[in-house]
C-alpha cells in the first residue's frame, strides 16, 4: 500500500465517510443494526458495530454478534469443496453421479444430462431456487423442495430426491442461474468425507482458520442478532414464517428464523450456516492472501477467475461467476468503483461483502435487516464511501 492509500485510511478519510453512511442509514431506519469490517493490505482499518442486535430487547450490536448467514454460507462451503479438489479427492469436471448416483434430474425433453462439480460451483447446472419461481410457486414448490431457509422435516437426501424430480431449466453449462446447487455440493462434500456437512466444513475450513463461531448451529443464543425485514415506516421484526420477495413477481423466500435452533434441520450448504463478521473476514483474508493453510495459490486464482464465459448473470451486470462467488469484469457496466477482478456476493438475511484483490481490500458488512443489508442502497453507499471520490483506494 502506498503512502497516498495509507493517508486515505485515516479518521478524516475512510472512517468519516463510512461512519456517515452507517449513521445516516440507521437514522433513516433502513437498518436496525450492523457490523462493518474493512481490511486493507492485511490490516483492519475500520471495525464498527452499530445499532441494535435486538430492538425489542434493547440489546446493542457487538462485534462478536452471531448472524444467520444465508448465502454467505456459499463461499464457505465452496471453499470446502475446493480443499477436497486440491487434495485430489474430487475433480471439478467429473460427473456428480460418482458421488450422488441417485441424483439424476432430467431436461424437459426427458434427456438425462451429466452435471459436474464445476457446474454446481458456478451455478450453471440447470437448477434454480423455489423463491425465484413465479409468484404462487412453480415446479419446486409443487415438488416440496426446501430452499434451506424454512422448517422442514426432510433430510438433505430427501430434499435432493424432490429436487431431482423437477426438470432442469437448461442443459448444464449452457446458461447461468442462481440456485440451490450449493446444497447439492454440500451433499457431495458430506459423502466424500463420510460425515455430516457440518463436521466436514469444520475439518476442511473453519477449524484450520480458527473460525470457532461459524457452523450450522448457534454457538451462543445470547449473541444471535434478531432478524428484521424492511417495511414502512421502519423495519419490523421478522415473523416465524415470513415470505419476502427478492424480485417483484417471484414466489419469495420463506424465512423461518427459528430454523437456526432446530438440531434436526438438514445442513443447507447454500444458506444454513451461522457465524460472525470476524470469522468470515478471516476466510476472505486467507483467500485474498493466497489460501494458506487451506489451498494452494493456484486454486485461489481459479476461484477468482470467471468460469462462465460470456453468459449473462441476471441482476449482476458486468460480472461473471467464479467458483463460489461473482467476479467483476466491467466496472462501468456494473456502476461500481471496484476494480476488475473483485469478488462479491451477499446473504438474504441482510449481508454484503466484497474483496478487491487489486487494491488488497476486503470488506464485510453483516446486518440484521433484509433486504437493505444485502441489496439496498446501503450497499452502494458503503462501497462509494470506501472508495471515495477518487474511484480507487
Image (cartoon, rainbow, N blue to C red):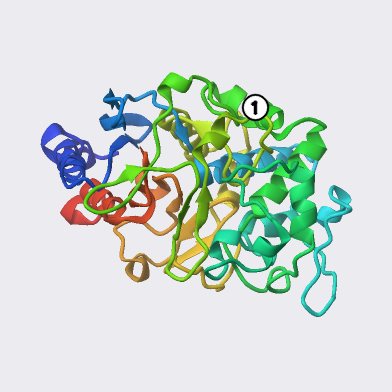
The answer to whether residue 264 is left or right of residue 386 is right
Q: Residue at x 48, y 41 (%)?
A: 240
Where residue 39 sits, quadrant-wise, is top left
Q: Residues within 10 Å of mark 1 (few under 14, many from 20)?
A: many
Q: Residue at x 29, y 36 (%)?
A: 33
> From this viewpoint, is residue 361 visible?
no
Task: Judge by depth and name the residue closer to the eye, 114 or 275.
Answer: 275
Q: Position of residue 343 (x, y in %)?
A: 46, 51
Name the side, left or right, on which 156 lies relative to 77. right
Residue 290 on image: x %, y %: 53, 38
Q: Quadrant of residue 93?
A: bottom right
The correct choice, above or below, for 308 with respect to 354 in the image is: below
Q: Quadrant of the N terminus?
A: top left
**What residue appears at the point 79 percent right and 33 percent down from the top-left corner?**
193
What residue does disc 1 label?
202
Q: Compare residues 250 and 380 and report the one nearer the observer.
A: 250
Where disc 1 sits, the SS reads helix
Q: Picture quarter containing residue 134?
A: bottom right
Residue at image point 23% right, 41% down: 5
Position above or below: 152 against 204: below
Give the image location of residue 181, x and y in percent. 66, 55
Q: Residue furthest bottom?
A: 109
- Farthest-out residue, left: 12
Mark count = 1
Visible residue check, residue 49: yes
- Counting from the top left corner in percent of width and height, residue 269 is at 64, 43
Residue nearer the viewer, 349 or 4: 349
Amino acid at each position: 500500500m502506498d503512502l497516498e492509500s495509507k493517508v486515505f485510511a485515516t479518521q478524516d478519510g475512510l472512517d468519516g465517510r463510512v461512519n456517515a453512511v452507517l449513521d445516516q442509514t440507521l437514522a433513516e431506519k433502513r437498518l436496525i443494526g450492523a457490523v462493518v469490517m474493512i481490511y486493507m493490505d492485511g490490516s483492519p482499518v475500520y471495525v464498527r458495530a452499530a445499532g441494535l442486535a435486538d430492538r425489542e430487547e434493547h440489546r446493542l450490536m457487538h462485534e462478536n454478534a452471531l448472524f444467520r448467514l444465508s448465502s454467505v454460507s456459499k463461499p464457505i462451503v465452496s471453499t470446502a469443496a475446493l480443499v477436497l479438489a486440491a487434495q485430489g479427492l474430487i475433480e471439478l469436471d467429473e460427473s456428480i453421479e460418482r458421488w450422488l448416483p441417485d441424483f439424476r434430474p432430467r431436461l424437459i425433453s426427458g434427456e438425462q444430462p451429466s452435471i459436474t462439480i464445476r457446474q454446481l460451483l458456478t451455478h450453471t447446472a440447470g437448477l434454480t431456487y423455489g423463491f425465484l419461481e413465479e409468484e404462487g410457486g412453480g415446479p419446486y414448490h409443487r415438488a416440496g423442495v426446501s430452499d434451506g431457509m424454512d422448517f422442514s422435516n426432510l433430510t438433505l437426501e430427501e430434499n435432493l430426491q424432490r429436487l431431482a424430480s423437477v426438470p432442469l431449466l437448461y442443459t448444464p453449462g449452457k446458461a447461468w442461474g442462481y440456485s440451490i446447487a450449493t446444497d447439492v455440493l454440500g451433499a457431495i462434500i458430506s459423502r466424500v468425507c463420510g460425515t455430516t456437512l457440518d463436521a466436514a466444513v469444520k475439518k476442511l475450513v473453519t477449524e484450520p482458520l480458527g473460525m470457532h463461531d461459524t457452523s450450522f448451529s448457534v454457538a451462543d443464543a445470547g449473541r444471535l442478532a434478531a432478524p428484521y425485514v424492511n417495511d414502512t415506516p421502519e423495519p419490523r421484526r421478522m415473523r416465524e414464517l415470513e415470505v419476502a420477495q427478492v424480485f417483484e413477481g417471484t414466489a419469495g423466500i420463506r424465512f423461518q428464523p427459528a430454523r437456526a435452533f432446530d438440531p434436526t434441520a438438514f445442513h443447507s450448504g447454500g444458506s444454513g450456516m451461522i457465524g460472525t463478521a470476524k470469522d468470515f473476514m478471516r476466510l476472505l483474508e486467507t483467500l485474498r492472501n493466497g489460501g494458506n493453510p487451506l489451498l494452494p495459490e493456484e486454486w485461489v486464482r481459479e476461484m477468482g477467475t470467471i468460469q462462465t464465459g460470456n453468459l449473462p448473470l441476471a441482476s449482476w451486470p458486468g460480472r461473471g461467476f467464479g467458483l463460489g462467488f461473482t467476479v467483476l469484469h466491467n466496472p462501468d457496466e456494473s456502476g461500481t468503483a471496484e476494480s476488475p477482478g473483485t469478488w462479491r456476493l451477499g446473504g438474504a438475511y441482510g449481508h454484503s461483502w466484497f474483496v478487491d484483490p487489486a487494491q488488497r481490500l476486503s470488506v464485510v458488512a453483516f446486518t440484521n435487516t433484509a433486504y437493505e443489508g444485502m441489496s439496498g442502497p446501503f450497499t452502494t453507499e458503503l462501497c462509494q464511501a470506501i472508495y471515495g471520490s477518487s474511484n480507487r483506494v
